[in-house]
Image: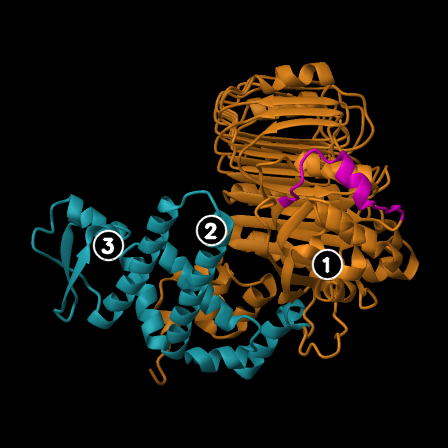
Chain colours: A orange, B cyan
């Protein structure tokens, strides 16, 4: 192949496909390779025009005032001028040669929104005239003055994907011609509930709607969304009032609204085909919660995060496959899902007092004790929560510096309803507590469960918990540790542990792992996994 | 019994392939549907390239069959292992192509001709990885691209794209 330029044999669209995997800088660099490459570059239909290549690091709406003064401003504007010329050159070239723009990403800061608006209006007009298919606009300006998108925007009939960030979409009476729009993403956009309703009702093929951080949005009403399949909303706390969605084939809905708020009405009776639901934050009232869930007979995945108003959670379903509960402050849960495939539960605060869970599948449980002490009672609750027959894939115990830790094996024996500790595949310890707490913690968790492996998260080079754990597990002295074990049916874990081996170490950051075990090495941040070999007498096994 | 088809390369070599494997190619699928291929299916692809194409298609086909048979217990670990296997296979496949760029470009053209979008994207990504982070002179050398700019022209273009040449 010596001397033959094979890459130039390729059809231009393949070269463009190759270029689409390069960074904008690398794409621009190809223009200098040869005349034919320069041609290919100038017709490359993906325009990624990012001002920060010229003006340095990206600013956000809060830090932008930093550049808006004196010398810094002058320099900024000088660099921005170069960028503006470049954008113009691109758009005019495409316009003059009547090339279609596949994708345009535009990222720019506006120090003076009013002055710059006509310029941006013109750019958008040019992009639309070139039949832009995917448009991604990120316009950063001062938090109080936002660039208002021009009405001509709505005439973009070829647009399939639209991402708008940091602008303003004002109420308008113009009809919207987003006939091809399938995905709409609104970030930090000033838009009212009314305008959003109009917008979504005039996009006949809209499949995905994504809304993040839109401050002025006071309600979310979607109707006539016949093709809508996914809606994802994440809002900062504000005066949000209600959600009403009528979307007959909607499959996925996620809504997160984190912050202290009063619950509001979520009406999704018109979404009977929902498969996947995620709610995060105090959205629904307790009384409405059960009724809300009953709207979705086909629901397969349910994730509930920090739904603070729900104190009593009852979920009963034959369809549900995956259930995830995180950050719950429930008093009671009653779960009956015989066909569940995965169940994960995570709460760092405290335990559910009464838990009736029928979920015969692999469990992932993560617990902590932010509001209570980690005492014998806590370990008992944990054991009870894990149930007797459940298959526990992973149990993570998270200990904070503020946790008071104590454990009394005798008390535990007396109060425990059954002898056998639970079987767990992996026990994950994330421990940030003084070494004096280690023994109680280890005795506690190993009374709750016998795990096939133990993973210890090493948080810093000063963290010696892994070393202590390994020594303790290896040098278990049955005689001196517990005289009380002789007379009890349930002996402590030391009687059953046969062997402990180091299985693996994975560093969080790329540093050299462990080499020798003669002296305990200083381990970087990472996860050390130990393999435990147990032998149980009949009565326990 | 799986239905077999005979593919004939441009240098007249015959490849016996299962229907499932070759139907990933939209071009061949259409030829079969149109009934144009009662005997051997003639293709404008050399035997060397076709062998590579089929290697890819077989690997892809295994991937989908295995995924179908998955039961959900212990899926995570199995999936992880599977992903590792595919990664390893792809790495080997890529390394071979990087070493022999002639095959790489033949394969690119073939994936376009046979309408194999997954292979086409994979190869484009591969070429992009080879180009990424290299200086123009290195890229020219790698792909035998002749620099037909005069020094003045080149200087002017580099200046025009000054932003792209800064670290």
Q: Are marks 2 and 1 in contact (CB under 8 Å)?
A: no
Could you tell me which residue is drawn at 84 percent across and 67 percent down? A462
Residue A435 point in image, percent of width and height: 86, 59
Q: Which residue sits furthest left?
A: B39
Horizontal relation, residue A260 to residue B132: left or right: right
Subunit under mark 2: A
Depth check, front residue: A27 or A468:
A468
Q: CA distance from mark 2 to mark 1?
A: 55 Å
Name the residue: 22% across, 48% down: B29
Q: Residue at x 53, y 23 (%)?
A: A317
Q: Are marks 2 and 1 on the same chain?
A: yes
Callout 2: SS? loop
Q: Chain of mark 1?
A: A
- Towards the viewer: A313 or A118: A313
Which residue occupies the extreme front position in the image? A487
Q: Earlier in the sequence, mark 2 or mark 1?
A: 2
Mark 1 Cα shell of 10 Å, populated few (<14), some (14-19), many (≥20): many
Label 2 Cα neighbours within 10 Å, binned few <14 / some 14-19 / many ≥20: some
Query: What range is drawn magenta here?
Result: A402-422
Residue A15 shows in this picture: no
Q: Quadrant of residue B8?
A: bottom left
- Say which mark, if any, is on residue A457: 1
A428, above or below A131, in the image: below
**Left or right: A227 with respect to A287?**
left
Q: Residue A423 versus residue B87: which sits nearer the camera?
A: A423
Q: Secondary structure at mark 1?
A: strand
Q: Which mark is residue B22?
A: 3
Marks 3/2 in contact by CB < 8 Å: the verdict is: no
The residue positioned 49% from the left and 48% from the top of the image is: B74
The single residue placed furthest to the right in the displayed view is A70
Q: CA distance from mark 1 to mark 3?
A: 48 Å
């Amino acid at each position: 192949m010596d001397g033959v330029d094979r890459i130039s044999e390729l059809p231009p669209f393949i070269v463009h496909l190759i270029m689409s995997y390069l960074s904008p800088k690398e794409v621009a660099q190809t223009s200098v390779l040869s005349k034919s490459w320069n041609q290919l570059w100038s017709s490359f239909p993906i325009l990624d025009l990012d001002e920060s290549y010229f003006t340095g690091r990206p600013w956000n709406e809060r830090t932008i005032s930093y550049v808006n003064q004196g010398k810094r401003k002058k320099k900024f504007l000088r660099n921005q001028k170069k960028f503006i010329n470049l954008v113009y050159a691109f758009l005019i070239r495409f316009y003059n040669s009547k090339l279609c723009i596949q994708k345009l990403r535009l990222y720019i800061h506006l120090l003076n929104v009013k002055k710059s608006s006509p310029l941006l209006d013109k750019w958008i007009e040019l992009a639309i005239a070139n039949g832009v298919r995917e448009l991604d606009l990120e316009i950063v300006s001062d938090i109080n003055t936002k660039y208002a998108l021009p009405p001509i925007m709505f005439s973009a009939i070829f647009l399939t994907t639209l991402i708008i960030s940091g602008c303003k979409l004002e109420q308008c009476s113009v009809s919207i011609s987003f006939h091809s729009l399938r995905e709409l993403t609104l970030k930090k956009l000033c838009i009212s509930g009314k305008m959003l309703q109009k917008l979504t009702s005039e996009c006949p093929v809209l499949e995905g709607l994504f809304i993040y951080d839109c401050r002025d949005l006071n309600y979310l009403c979607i109707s006539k969304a016949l093709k809508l399949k996914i809606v994802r909303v994440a809002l900062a706390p504000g005066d949000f009032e209600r959600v009403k969605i009528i979307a007959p084939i909607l499959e996925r809905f996620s809504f997160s609204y984190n912050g202290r708020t009063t619950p509001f009405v979520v009406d999704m009776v018109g979404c009977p085909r929902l498969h996947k639901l995620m709610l995060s934050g105090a959205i629904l009232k307790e009384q409405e919660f059960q009724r809300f869930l009953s709207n979705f007979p086909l629901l397969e995945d349910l994730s509930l995060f920090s739904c603070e108003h729900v104190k009593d959670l009852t979920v009963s379903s034959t369809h549900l496959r995956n259930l995830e509960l995180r950050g719950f402050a429930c008093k009671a849960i009653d779960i009956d899902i015989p066909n569940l495939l995965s169940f994960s539960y995570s709460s760092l605060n405290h335990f559910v007092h009464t838990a009736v869970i029928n979920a015969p599948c692999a469990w992932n449980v993560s617990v902590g004790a932010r509001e209570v002490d980690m005492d014998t009672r806590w370990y008992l609750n944990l054991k009870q929560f894990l149930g007797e027959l459940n298959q526990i894939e992973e149990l993570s115990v998270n200990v904070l510096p503020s946790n008071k830790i104590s454990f009394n094996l005798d008390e535990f024996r007396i109060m425990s309803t059954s002898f056998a500790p639970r079987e767990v595949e992996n026990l994950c310890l994330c421990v940030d507590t003084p070494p004096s707490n280690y023994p109680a913690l280890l005795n506690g968790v190993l009374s709750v469960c016998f795990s096939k492996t133990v993973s210890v998260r090493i948080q810093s080079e000063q963290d010696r918990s892994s070393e202590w754990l390994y020594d303790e597990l290896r040098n278990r002295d049955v005689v001196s540790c517990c005289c009380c074990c002789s007379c009890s049916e349930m002996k402590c874990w030391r009687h059953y542990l046969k062997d402990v081996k180091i299985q693996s170490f994975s560093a969080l950051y790329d540093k050299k792992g462990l080499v020798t075990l003669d002296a305990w090495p200083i381990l970087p941040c990472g996860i050390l996994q130990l393999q435990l070999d147990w032998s149980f007498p009949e009565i326990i096994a | 019994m799986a239905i077999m088809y005979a593919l004939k390369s441009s240098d007249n070599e015959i490849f016996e392939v299962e229907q499932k494997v070759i139907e990933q190619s939209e071009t061949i699928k259409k030829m079969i549907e149109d009934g144009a291929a009662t005997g051997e299916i003639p293709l404008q692809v050399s035997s060397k390239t076709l062998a590579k194409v089929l290697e890819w298609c077989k690997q892809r086909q295994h991937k989908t069959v295995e995924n179908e048979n998955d039961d959900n217990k212990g899926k995570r670990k199995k999936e992880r292992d599977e992903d590792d296997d595919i990664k390893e296979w792809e790495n080997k496949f890529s390394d071979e192509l990087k070493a022999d760029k002639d095959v790489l470009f033949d394969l690119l053209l073939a994936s376009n001709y046979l309408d194999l979008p997954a292979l086409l994207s994979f190869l484009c990504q591969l070429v992009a990885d080879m180009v990424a982070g290299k200086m123009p002179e290195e890229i020219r050398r790698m792909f035998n691209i002749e620099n037909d700019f005069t020094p003045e022209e080149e200087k002017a273009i580099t200046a025009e794209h000054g932003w792209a040449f800064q670290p």
